[in-house]
Image (spheres, rainbow, N blue to C red):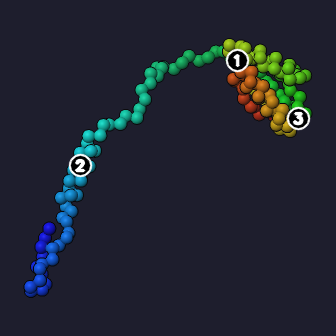
Amino acid sequence: MNVGSGSAQGADPEPMMEMNMTPLIDVLLVLIIMMIITIPKQNHSVNLNMPVGTPPPSNVKPVVVTIDVDFDGTILWDGEVIPDRPALEAKMNSVAAMPDQPEVHLRPNKLVEYKVVAGVMATAQRLGVTKIGMVGNEQFQ
């Protein structure tokens, strides 16, 4: 604390109430530097054992089952008309039971109601068909 000279001759001198901030800032900077130095190094990588080399090419062509849905809701399994829902479920069960499931390509007509296509997809999901995908259908569009 500094004591300044009074302006009046007989008055008590007023103390200066300013604190010297330089030592406080120096101590805080030293503490920050010590904290930065002591923080452990963060390692955000995950070690994986990856295979080495190129895998051999697969000579086996995947089996493809094509399901066409015509504009009026008619379902065709590889070109064969499926008369009703139980027949479709029987065919889906046979596909789902295979250890290596074939790829199921669903090709709906652009004019068909969505509920028919959604019904086929829901049946496939419910029965456990995992390799199903929508494919563009040039023949029916």
Which residue carries the number 1 mark? 101
Percent position (x, y) of residue 96?
73, 17
Q: Residue furthest left?
A: 10
Percent position (x, y) of residue 110?
83, 38
Q: Name the image quarter holding the N terminus.
A: bottom left
Q: Decide which of 113, 137 is in the foreground and name it.
A: 113
Q: Amino acid at mark 1?
A: Gln
In percent of the image, x 80 and y 28: which residue is there?
A: 120
Q: Residue furthest bottom?
A: 9
In percent of the image, x 19 and y 70: which residue is there?
A: 17
Give the CA separation, mark 3 to mark 2.
75 Å
Cβ–Cβ under 8 Å for marks 3 and 2: no
Q: Amino acid at mark 3?
A: Phe
Percent position (x, y) of residue 98?
71, 13
As drawn, 36 above or below 13: above
As drawn, 84 above or below 22: above
As drawn, 17 above or below 134: below
Which numbered dot is residue 31?
2
In percent of the image, x 78 and y 25: which residue is there?
A: 123
Can residue 103 be seen here? The reply is no
- Which mark is first along the chain, 2 or 3? 2
Q: Residues within 10 Å of mark 2 (few under 14, many from 20)?
A: few
Give the CA separation, mark 1 to mark 2.
64 Å
Can residue 83 be seen here? The reply is yes
